[in-house]
Amino acid sequence: MDFNPAGENRITVTSNAAWQASCPDAALKFSPASGTGDGVITVSDVPAGKRCVLTVTAGTGSDAKSETVEIVRRADVQDDPFFTLDFGDGAGGVWADGNQEWKTQTGAGASTVSYEVYNMRINNDNFGSAGKYAGASGKAYAKLFYDPAKTYFTIAHIALPVAETDYTLSFGAIFEAGDMTLAISADGKSWKPLTYTAAPTYNTWTLTRVGFTLKEPVGELYIRFSPTGTERAYGLNFDDIRLSAGGGGQQVDLGTTVAGYRWAELPATPADMTHKKIHTFWASTVTSKQYLRNYTYCYDTRRHSPLWIAHPQHACYQEGGWTRPATDPWAQDPNMTVGEQAVMWPIDGRAKSLVSDTPEGPYQWQRGHLLASSYRGCGDKNNPAEINKQTFLACNISAQRMDNSKAFQTLWAAAERRFTDQYVCADTLYCVSGAYFADENTRAYDCSWISGDVRYSLVEYSKECIVPTHYYKLLLRTRSGNLRKPIQECSAGELKAVGFWFENADVIKGSTAPTLGAEFMVSVEEIEKITGFTFFPDVPAEVKRQCVPSDWGF
C-alpha cells in the first residue's frame, strides 16, 4: 500500500472472527487495532521513506489466519493538481454526449483534453457529493450505467509534466472497486488497469485516491472508467477527478504502440494547425468487443468540413453486418462547438442538410460519409452499435453531390465497395479519405432545408460552408496480406500503396455514370503535392510513388 498523506489510507479487513492488527514499528499510526468481522483499518501516518509491515491476525491458536500489508510513504503529492474536473453546476438529467456544460476541466494539463463518452448522464440534485468528503464540489456529478458493452468515459490527452513518473489520481465515488474498471494509457490504445479502493459499501460517497508510478515518463495520459457489469440501483456515480504529480505507488508500464510505432494510417500532423482540429474516436466491435480506434479526423473549422479521415479497415470492424441504422443517427461532434462544424443533425425535430443558393434555385447537397457507415458494423439496426453511430457525427460528413447526380456518387460508392470486398486483409488495410478545395466558389448553408424552390434555415445556427471540389481515397497494405508484422518493419517491396482522385461533379470525364478504373488512380505522393499533407509518413518514399493498377486488380 502506498501511503498518501493527503488522502484516506484504508485497508479492508474481511473476516468471520475477531482479529487484531500489529506492527513492530511504532512509527506507523493506525486504528482500530482490533475488531470482529469485516472492518476497515485507517492508516494516519507513516514517516517519509519508511516501509512498515502491518499484520492482521484473525482467530486464535491453530485456527488463526494472518495476512500482511507493506505500507510505504513516497514523495508528497503536490498541492496544485494539473488536471481537475468537477462537472460544474450546469443542467442535470442530461446525456453527457449532448451537453457541454460539464466540461469544466482546469489545470496546466487540461488545455489539450478531449473526452470520449457513451451512456453517461450528468446529474445535479440532492444525491450528489456535497459535504460527503473533504473537498467535495457537490453540484453536478457523472452517472455511468452498468452495461460494459455500451458504457464508458475516457479523459484523453491530459498533458503531463516533463520527466515526472509519480502521480496521484483522486475522485469521489459511490461504487465499490469491483463495479468499475479504472485504466490508464499513454496513447488511447494500450490500457493498463489501476488497482484502487473505492466506497466501502455501495451508495456511500467516498473520496478515492490511487497512487501510481510510471516505468517511463510519457507526454500525455488517458484515463478510462468502464463498468464491469455489476447492476447497481442508482448507477455508478463519481465526481471531482483530480490528477496531481507526486505520491506514486503501483508500478505501471504504459509503453506506447506496437514496437513503439505510430498508427500506420495516421497522416503527419500539419505544420499549420490554424482552423484545424484533430481527434480520434474509439469504440468496441460488435461481436468480439475489442475496444479499438475507430477513426481519426482533421477538421477545417473555417470551411466547416473534414479535410481527411484516417482509419484502419479489418474484418473485426464490420462485425454486426452491413445493415444501416433504421434511423440515421446524425449528431454533433461533442469535441467541437456548433459554430465550428456544419450543422447537419436534426434540430427542433426537423432534419437538416447543406443547401446552396444558385440561379437555378436551391440545391441540396448530400450528407456524405468519408468513412462509410457500412465500414463499421451496426448490429441491431434499432439500437446501432456506437462504432457505427460515430460515423454519423458531423466531423465525418462532407458536402457531396446528391444520388441523382450520378457521376461522383457512382465512383465513390464503387470505390467503397471495392475496397472492403477486395482489399481488406489479415494484416489490415490502412485508409485515408479526404476532401480537397481547388477553389472556394461553391458555398452551401448548413442547418437548412428546402421546400419547392425556397431555402429555409434556423438562422441562429445556419452559416456558410465551403463545398469541396474533389475527394480522394488512399490505401496502404502489405502485398501478401498476411505478413503479421507492423508496417514500419516491412521493406518497400513488401508494401503497396495507391490513391484514387475524384471530382465532386455531375459529369466526370464526359460521363454521368463513369466506371471506376485505372484512369482515376494516382500515387499517394501526387496527392501529397496537391493537398500539402504528408500521408503514411512511416513508409519509404518509393512506396508512396507507386501507382500500379495491376496491384489493385485493374
Image (cartoon, rainbow, N blue to C red):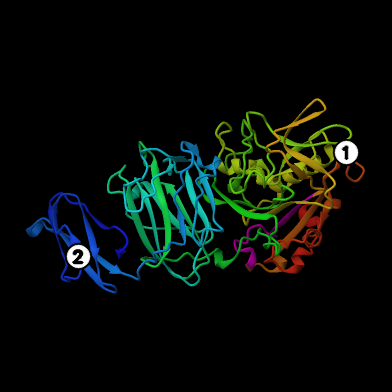
Q: Which mark is residue 146?
A: none
Is 30 rendered above or below residue 416? below
Under mark 2, the amino acid is: Lys
Mark 1, residue position = 512
478 drawn magenta: yes
Q: Residues within 10 Å of mark 2 (few under 14, many from 20)?
A: some
- The answer to whether residue 319 is left or right of residue 494 is left
| Most distant residue in the top direction | 452
User: Residue drawn at (50%, 53%), measured in percent from left and top?
Assistant: 105
- The answer to whether residue 24 is left or right of residue 103 is left
User: Residue drawn at (79%, 45%), measured in percent from left and top?
Assistant: 467
| Most distant residue in the bottom direction | 49
User: Residue drawn at (66%, 67%), measured in percent from left and top?
Assistant: 490
Q: Residues within 10 Å of mark 1 (few under 14, many from 20)?
A: some
User: Tag 2, which secondary structure?
Assistant: strand
- Between disc 1 and disc 2, whose residue precedes? 2
User: Residue drawn at (35%, 57%), measured in percent from left and top?
Assistant: 209
Mark 2, residue position = 29
Number of marks drawn: 2
Image coordinates for residue 334, horizontal then vertical, percent: 58, 45
Q: Nearest to the eye among marks 1 and 2: give it.
A: 2
Image coordinates for residue 311, horizontal then vertical, percent: 65, 52
If the image is split into quadrants, where does the N terminus sit? bottom left
553 drawn magenta: no
**Span shown in magenta:** 471-488
- The answer to whether residue 152 is left or right of residue 235 is right
Under mark 1, the amino acid is: Thr
